[in-house]
Image (cartoon, grey):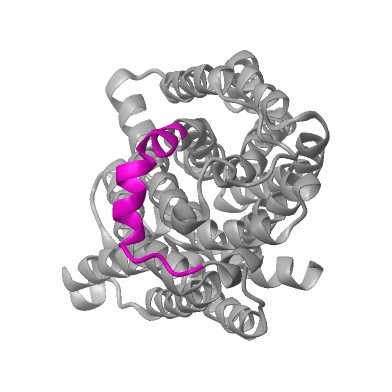
Amino acid sequence: MARKVVAAGSGNVLEWYDFTAYGFLAPIIGSAFFPSDDPVASLLASFGALAAGYAARPFGSIIFGHIGDRIGRKPALLISVVIMGFGALGIGLLPTYAQIGIAGPILLVVLRCVQGISVAGEYANSGVLLTESSQPRQRGLIGSWIVFGMTCGCLLGSGVSALVSNVLGQEAMQEWGWRLPFLFGSVIAIFSVILRVHLTESPVMVARAKAETSPIIVAIRTQWRPMLIIIGLVLPTGIGYFLIFVYAASYLTDQMHFTTAQALDISTVSMVAFAAVAPISGHLSDRFGRKPVMYVTLIGTLLLAWPLWAFMHDQNLTIIFLGQIILAAINGVGWAMTIPMMVEMLPSKVRVSAVAMSYNVCLAVFGGTTPWVATYLVQRTSFDYAPVIYWMAAAVIALVIVLKLPEMARKPLP
């Protein structure tokens, strides 16, 4: 089972490595592809390209949900990681605006969209495959390892970016050093393909007959209520992640005037807390139930997000570290619950399609746009806590949903 966990989770490592590296390097990418006299305008354009990749995810959900439900979870995982690898390579080699003019930013947006399509089924297919392959009393723990893998990708994304930034310095980073993290992403893709070639298919997929109708059509027609519930559940975790690890890094460099290396160091350390709580939360949810663990992250967000955001505005690096580490841990608990709770709501014939569509619609509409929305809100209102209100509102919606949900831990899958 350990080998299956590593193989299935390896694509999530690449997915979140790539998007985290892009988010952390957004100010540099903005100046390289979207030059402007106003650095905020360049940053907004760079975040817009990031959001475009997430906007393409619902289309990818249809494609990779269909492959996962009709052909198999394994083929979907293999195809997605190959495309992700080529996308990372393309960005690493892409000429800038100064080199080829407007074609540079256009190609950047196209590559982000291609990557968005390719990763749309990654989280869903890997999570479904592992959860279906595990014992009912271990579904939370096994599913949480996907989040751990995702976190390893985030750690690599921030760690590699921080290392390159520290070694090369700001000037070289601005000129060409930003390309190195993306080129390294293509190497991760090669290792993932090697691991996934030997991955065994989900026993549920092997045992059942193929669906005769398009899975996504069946999912929307018969499972629209659970899909809406999933969107509400993922809402605060998605918004929280992009506030803590993408927006905050750019805010610290652009508004608080810390160096890129310092901002990346803070985020990298915070990721350790995020990773540590995932398997612990998954195990606790197997023992005490999904709902009690979800209450921890949602109530924790409502009570602590505001004061901890104040820590993020302090001039003392130690205080900023403390604020972001606690916020990361709270957010990590919520992420650990996403896979088991999503999978336990849906029947096997449309499970990947329904999970992928609802999860990716949420990230496309709310998650990937969060850095842009946060930057815009602060600029329009001159109120640094506007992003926190946005996050807390999402937590209230999810809390109302969880209160009405039945407990599904240790029960047979639909």
User: Is 188 left or right of 46, judged from the image as shown?
Assistant: right
Indicate the position of residue 200 as horizontal and vertical percent values.
Answer: 66, 77
- Is residue 251 or residue 49 the one in the foreground? 49
Q: Is residue 215 above or below residue 314?
A: below
Which quarter shows the N terminus? bottom right
At a point 60% along the width and 77% down the height, the residue shown is 188
Indicate the position of residue 336 as horizontal and vertical percent values.
Answer: 67, 42
User: Is 274 left or right of 12, judged from the image as shown?
Assistant: right
Q: Residue furthest left?
A: 102
At a point 25% along the width and 57% down the height, the residue shown is 35
- Is residue 342 or residue 368 the one in the foreground? 342
Can you tell which quarter of the image residue 223 is in?
A: top left
Residue 25 in view (yes/no): no
At a point 31% along the width and 41% down the height, the residue shown is 40
Residue 213 highlighted magenta (yes or no): yes
Span highlighted in magenta in the image: 209-229
- Is residue 109 or residue 105 the one in the foreground? 109
Magenta-drawn stretch, dominant element (helix, strand or loop): helix
At a point 65% along the width and 58% down the height, the residue shown is 132
Residue 137 in view (yes/no): yes
Q: Is residue 395 above or below residue 46?
A: above
User: Is 241 left or right of 409, judged from the image as shown?
Assistant: left
Indicate the position of residue 186 as horizontal and vertical percent values.
Answer: 52, 79
Q: Is residue 265 above or below residue 212?
A: above
Residue 95 highlighted magenta (yes or no): no
